C-alpha cells in the first residue's frame, strides 16, 4: 500500500509509573499493573508531503489498566499551538496512526486505546540533554515532567544504562533516566522517581528510521 | 596499590528470579523484594599471574533477603574440577573480589554484601551459550540446573531482542537479555521457571570490565 511520504525526527522524552528500566520494554508485566505516563517529542526536522513540520512539538498522556497489550487505554494528544491548520492536520494524521504500516509505534499503541480525548492545541515547553540524561517538558494546565539521572543507591553517583532494541518499534536506543511527573488535565496522575527515557528517533510510514 | 595481573574473558550467563530485565540492573528494587541468582562462565582465555585459566568454568549461586546492596547475602562458588590447585586458588581469589580495585568488578562489589560464604565446591560444570541466539545452559549434576532462551513477545510470540548497555558497568558493557530458569538444592535453594537472564562476553581485569 502506498502512503503519503512523511518523516518526523528529533529528541523524544518519556516517563511512566513503572520502576527504572520499565519491565514492559522486556515484555514483563508493568511494575504496578496500571501503566500511566506521558511523552513529548520535538520535531527537529519533519514533513508530511509538502507540509514542513520542523520545530514543532507534540506530547501525549496515557493510562492503561494493565499491560499495554491487553488494551483498554485512554490517551490525550497535545499539539504545539504554533502549528498552522495544515500542520495540525498533518500531525494528527501521523499521531493517530494513519498513513503508516500497522507495525509502527503510533499504530501499535493506537490499537490498545479505548478512549481518546480531543487533542489540545497549546504551548509545549521542551528541553533535553540526552547525553546527560536531563530533560523536561510541560503543557500548562495539563502536564509536567522532569528527567534526571538514576542514582546508585550506595554511592549516589549517576547510573548510566541504555536499552537497545535492534527491532524496536518505538526506539532503537534510549538512555535510561529517573522521571517525576504530574497530570492535572483530563488524565490525572502523579508519580516520582520512576521509569524515564531519552532518545533521538525518526519515524516514517514504515516505522522507525535508523538515524545513526 | 598494585594487584596481581589477571584477566578472564569468555561467555557468561546470569539468571535471577526477578522479572525479565531485572530492575536491579537499573537501580530499582528487585521484583519480588529479594534476590536469588546463578551465574556461570566459560573462561576461553584467562590468567592469574603466571597461572593459565583457559578453558575452565566457574559458577556462583547467590541469594539476598532484600535488594543486593542491603546485604546479608549468601554465596556458593563452584570451580571446575579440572582446575589444578593453583588454578582453583586463582579463580577463587578472583571470585572473592580480592586482587581487584575496590568497586571495579561485580565480584568485588558483591563480596561486601555476603554474610554467609559456603565452602567452595570443585565439580564438573557443563556450560553452553549462544549469545546472539540467546540460548544457553549450565549445570552441575546434583547441584544446579539453569537455562536461558529468548523472551517472547506476548502478542506475536516472536523472539524479543533487547540489549542493555552500561558504559561504566561493573559486570559488562553490553548484554543480551533473555528469559531464564534455575533450580538448585542445598545449600543454596533456587527455583524459578521464567525469570530474568542475560548473556555477555565477560572480559574482566583487576580494573573492571575491558572496553
Image (cartoon, rainbow, N blue to C red):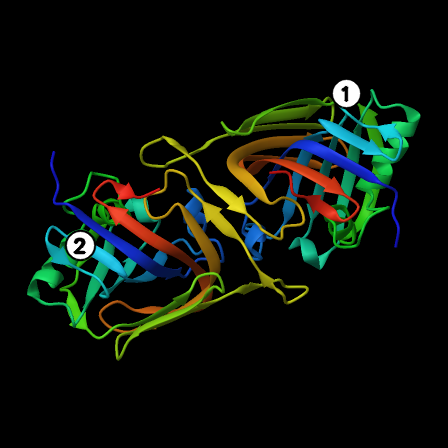
Q: Is residue A212 visible?
A: yes
Residue B47's disc is 2
Q: Label 2 neighbourhood size at 10 Å, few (<14), some (14-19), many (20+)?
A: some
Which image quarter holds the C terminus of chain A?
A: top right
Query: Which residue occupies 57% across, 37% down?
Result: A197
Q: Residue at x 28, y 61 (%)?
A: B44
Q: Nearer the viewer, residue A138 or B50?
A: B50
For the residues carrying marks 1 and 2, which lies nearer the camera in this image?
Answer: 2
* Residue A91 quadrant: top right
Percent across and percent down for residue A143 are: 69, 28
Q: Quadrant of residue A69?
A: bottom right
- Outermost residue toward the bottom in this view: B142
Where residue A176 sits: x, y (%)? 51, 38
Count of numbered badges drawn on the protein: 2
Left or right placement of residue B114 versus residue A35 in this view: left
In this view, A41 is above or below B180: above
| Quarter of the figure with the N terminus of chain A | bottom right
> To which residue does mark 1 refer?
A123
Q: Chain of mark 1?
A: A
Compared to A76, does A102 lie above or below?
below
Q: Which mark is residue A164?
A: none
Q: CA distance from mark 1 to mark 2?
A: 61 Å
Amino acid at each position: 500500500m502506498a502512503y503519503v511520504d512523511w518523516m518526523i525526527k528529533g529528541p523524544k522524552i518519556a516517563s511512566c509509573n513503572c520502576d527504572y528500566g520499565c519491565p514492559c520494554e522486556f515484555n514483563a508485566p508493568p511494575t504496578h499493573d496500571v501503566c500511566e505516563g506521558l511523552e513529548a517529542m520535538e520535531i527537529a526536522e519533519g514533513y508530511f508531503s509538502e507540509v514542513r513540520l520542523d520545530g514543532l512539538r507534540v506530547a501525549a498522556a496515557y493510562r492503561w489498566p494493565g499491560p499495554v497489550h491487553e488494551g483498554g487505554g485512554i490517551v490525550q494528544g497535545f499539539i504545539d499551538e504554533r502549528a498552522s491548520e495544515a500542520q495540525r492536520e498533518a500531525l494528527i494524521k501521523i499521531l493517530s496512526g494513519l498513513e503508516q504500516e500497522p507495525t509502527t509505534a503510533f499504530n501499535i499503541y493506537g490499537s490498545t486505546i479505548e478512549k481518546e480525548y480531543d487533542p489540545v492545541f497549546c504551548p509545549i515547553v521542551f528541553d533535553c540533554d540526552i547525553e546527560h540524561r536531563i530533560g523536561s517538558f510541560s503543557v500548562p494546565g495539563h502536564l509536567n515532567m522532569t528527567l534526571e539521572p538514576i542514582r546508585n543507591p550506595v554511592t549516589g553517583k549517576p547510573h548510566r544504562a541504555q536499552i537497545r532494541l535492534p527491532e524496536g518499534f518505538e526506539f532503537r536506543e534510549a538512555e535510561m533516566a529517573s522521571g517525576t511527573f504530574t497530570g492535572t488535565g483530563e488524565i490525572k496522575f502523579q508519580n516520582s522517581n520512576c521509569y524515564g527515557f531519552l532518545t533521538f528517533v525518526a519515524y516514517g510510514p514504515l516505522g522507525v528510521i535508523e538515524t545513526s | 596499590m598494585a594487584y596481581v595481573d589477571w584477566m578472564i574473558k569468555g561467555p557468561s550467563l546470569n539468571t535471577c528470579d526477578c522479572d525479565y530485565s531485572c530492575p536491579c540492573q537499573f537501580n530499582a528494587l528487585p521484583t519480588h523484594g529479594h534476590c536469588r541468582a546463578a551465574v556461570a562462565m566459560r573462561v576461553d582465555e584467562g590468567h592469574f599471574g603466571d597461572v593459565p585459566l583457559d578453558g575452565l568454568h566457574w559458577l556462583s549461586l547467590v541469594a539476598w533477603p532484600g535488594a543486593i546492596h542491603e546485604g546479608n547475602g549468601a554465596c556458593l562458588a563452584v570451580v571446575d574440577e579440572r582446575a589444578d590447585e593453583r588454578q582453583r586458588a586463582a579463580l577463587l581469589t578472583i571470585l572473592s573480589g580480592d586482587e581487584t580495585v575496590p568497586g571495579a568488578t561485580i565480584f568485588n562489589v558483591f563480596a561486601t554484601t555476603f554474610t554467609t560464604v559456603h565452602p567452595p565446591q570443585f565439580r564438573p560444570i557443563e556450560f553452553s551459550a549462544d549469545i546472539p541466539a540467546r540460548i544457553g545452559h549450565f549445570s552441575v549434576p546434583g547441584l544446579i540446573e539453569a537455562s536461558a532462551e529468548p523472551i517472547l513477545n506476548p502478542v506475536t510470540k516472536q523472539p524479543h531482542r533487547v540489549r542493555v548497555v552500561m558504559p561504566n558497568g561493573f559486570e559488562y558493557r553490553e548484554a543480551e537479555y533473555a528469559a531464564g530458569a534455575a533450580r538448585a538444592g542445598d545449600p543454596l535453594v533456587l527455583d524459578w521457571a521464567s525469570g530474568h537472564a542475560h548473556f555477555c562476553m565477560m572480559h574482566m581485569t583487576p580494573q573492571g570490565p575491558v572496553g
